[in-house]
Structure formats: C-alpha cells, structure tokens
Amino acid sequence: MEFAAELLRRIAQALLMLLTQPFYYIGILFVIMQYRRQMRLERKLFHTRLHSWAGQTWRTLLAGLAGGMAASFVLAFTGAALQPDTVLFLWGTAFLLTLVRVRFFCIAYAAGLLGILHSIAAAFPQLGQSVPPQIFRPIAELEIGSLLALVAVLHLLEAGLVRIQGASGATPLFVEGKRGKIVGAYHLQGIWPVPLLLVVPAQTGADFLPWTPWFGGDVWSSGWTIAAFPAVIGFSAMTVSRLPQVKAKRCAGILLAYGIVMLLAAICAEMWPVAAIGASVLSIVLHETAVWYGQWEESQQSPRFVHDERGLVILGVLPASPAAEMGIRAGEIIHKVNGVKVRTKEELHRAISQNPAFCKLEIINLEGQSKFVGRAIFSGDHHQLGILLAPDDHVIVYAQTRQMSLIGFVRTQVTGLWKRPTKEM
C-alpha cells in the first residue's frame, strides 16, 4: 500500500511536470501544422476536403496519450535509465536534424547519433579537455542500452498506431508518375505526441523498486522517481499502387520488425558496451533502409489509380456523401451509369443527367466483381455524388513529392506543394 501511494504521488508530480514541458507543445504544434497543410492540399486539388483538421488533431492526441501510457508501463519494467540532460540532447539533436529533412524528426536518428557520439567520447576521453563539460559529460554518461530500448518500444508503439490510424488520415493526391503521367496516389502521414512517464533512477537514498528493471544495471540501487518525457513519433509514406489500408498494414509490419531488431540491439548494447556503437549505427541505417525499401517497393509496382478501358477509377469518397451511403469505396471503378459505359468525366456527367430522377451505377468492386448501386437524384444534385476520380489528361495541378527541411515544411503552410504542369499530358 505504501508503494502504491508513493507511486501515485510521483505520477501526479510527473504529470504536472509534463504540463510545463515546452517540447510536448512543440509536438502538438507539428500535428496542427501537418493537418492544416493536409486540408490546404485537399482544397487545392479537389475543391473540397475529406478531413477535419480539428477532428484529426484530437484523435491523434488521444491516441498518442493512450499509447504513451502503454509504453510507460512497458518501460517501467524494461528500464529507462535516462538523465534530464538526455531529454534536452534528444530534442536538440532532433531539431537540428529536421533542418536537413523533416522526416528526421524521429528518435531513431537522434538516439543513433547520440550513441555514436557517446562511443567516441568513451574511446577518446581526452576530448573532454577541449569540449565544454556541459556537453561532453552528459554524452559520455549516456546509458545507450536504455536509450535504444526507448527507441525500440516507441517504434513498436508506432507500428500499432500506424496499423490502427495510418489509413484513416490518408490524403488522396495527384502526383507525377515514373513516365511523366499524372496518376492518383495516397499520402499516409502521422505525427503522434507521446507523453511518457518514465521510472528513472534517482539519488533518493531509501526508496527502492519492488522489481529491478532490465536496463540500467546498478544505477537502480540508489532509488527511483518518475520523470515526464515528451516524445514525438511519426511516419510518412506515399503509395500509388496500394489502397491506404493495405499500405498502412505494410508499413506497420516493417515498423514492427524494426522495433524487434532494435530491442535485440539494445540488449546487446547493455550486455556488451563495446556493441553500443554498432547498435547506434544500426538504429540509423536500419531506419533508412526501411524507408528506402518502401520507396523501392512502390517503384516496382504499377499505378493503381489510373483510368483504363473498364471505366473511371475512384480515388476517394467524401465522408457522409451519397457515394458513401451507397457503399462506394476508393479503388473501385465506375463501369456504367444508367446503362451507359463511361470512360471520361464528361461521359459520366452526361450519363447521370439522362435520368433526372434516379441514378444507377454499375461498379467493379475491389474483387473485380460487378455490383449495382442506385440513388435518387434531386434538382442540381448530379455533380454532388461525393466521388473523387483519379486524374485525367486535363488535370490542372498536382502535388510535388519532394523531401523537405523544416524551413521548407513551414514555407508550405503558405505556398503549398502544388504546381501547374508545363506540358500537355
């Protein structure tokens, strides 16, 4: 009972500490900026929006909060022997890396880089004479095993969040394909602020845990406390060949494998300190390999969201629209409308207008089977089915898919990522 009461007291103190942490609010700001940019892209490309930035933000924050509590529970037993200076170094390193690429705003890169610097400091202690002690000492005293275990647990959590939420916030886009043709695509991106309440070693003198965390070794013999650690996890993926839910499942599997491998690497770094530099390099290289593999895998597939002889491919369906009520789904193909084959948007509109009272569509579903759906048409309603079609040869704008720095990311909040084609497609 005494331990439970003490645990609750320290959790309350850590929660109050979290509210004073600017890093958590920085993470929330990134989420808001991401979804505002997403809304701008949707309005620019489709003259409407599929998502609400406020709703997406709340769902993301709640998922991050729940995930943070789950990860905190796991880390309480694995161990998170991190010092307060480690938080500052992680966030500072992550910020510097975002000046190169926004996607480097990930603990895998920051922790890996700090692990490499730690190994250099351990191998060349004489560097402490020329490096300021407020920088050299925290790096030299890093618990690399604990740090890499944190990387592993957060990526396992990220795998779960991507599996659950990765497809729900996917943005349909028009992008330039491999041969210069404009094709339909989906951009999956998520940033989750994850508040962690970490059980960390402290010089309290008399308080001891009823269990011994795996990482950290003898540092737990002096006592413990709970510290607030605001983390941010995120992922980004583009697909032209898969439906969002299929791509999200694929990405989640890759993240799960990464998390398991990094947990094994963290154990090796804890048991054999000489392996710390190899595990730190692996944190970066393996993450980059996963990103490269996803891009390479996409490049080997044919675009899915392009019109063909069967009809018009549906890129997206607006929520709460007539199309959604009829059960039409992204990736399906409009084959006939009121018995008339359609191959262009103009043919679609003419076919719908032929019957002023009722619209009957023959759809080729995701399994390649025909299904028939229908709906009453009201005056002036024939253009409002809520279907977003894949691009045709007359598309006006499309999204650029380039890697951005933090400055570029902020600039796109004003200018956007789209540009007009310079030639007829």
Image (cartoon, helix red, strand yellow):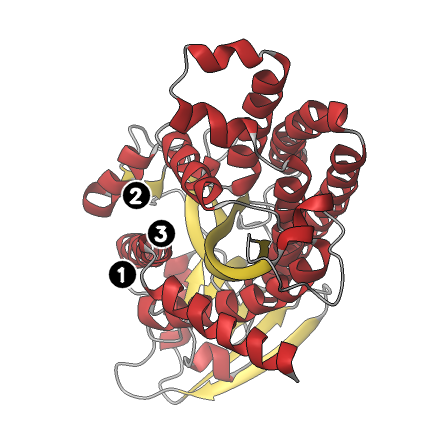
Write the residue at 60% across / 48% down.
Answer: 304
Residue under circle 3?
A: 23
Vertical arrangement, residue 135 with respect to residue 357, above or below = above
Query: Looking at the figure, which quarter contains the C terminus?
Result: top left
For label 1, the residue is 47
Residue under pointer 2:
397
Q: Is residue 94 above or below residue 341?
A: above
Marks 2 and 1 close (CB-CB < 8 Å): no
Residue at 48 percent of width and 27 percent of height: 137
Whether 157 is drawn above or below 88: the answer is below
Q: Position of residue 191 (x, y in %)?
A: 45, 54
Query: Decide: marks 3, 2 in contact (CB < 8 A)?
Result: no
Name the one closer to the observer, 318 or 70.
70
The residue tagged with tag 2: helix, strand or loop? Answer: loop
- Judge left or right: residue 261 versus residue 85: right
Query: In this rendering, would 406 be left or right of 271?
Result: left
For the residue pair 50 and 198, the one nearer the viewer reads as 198
Query: Which amino acid type is marked by label 3?
Result: Phe
Q: CA distance from mark 3 to mark 2?
A: 36 Å
Q: Quadrant of residue 265?
A: top right
Residue type at numbered disc 1: His
Residue that lies at the very extreme toward the front in this rendered image = 205
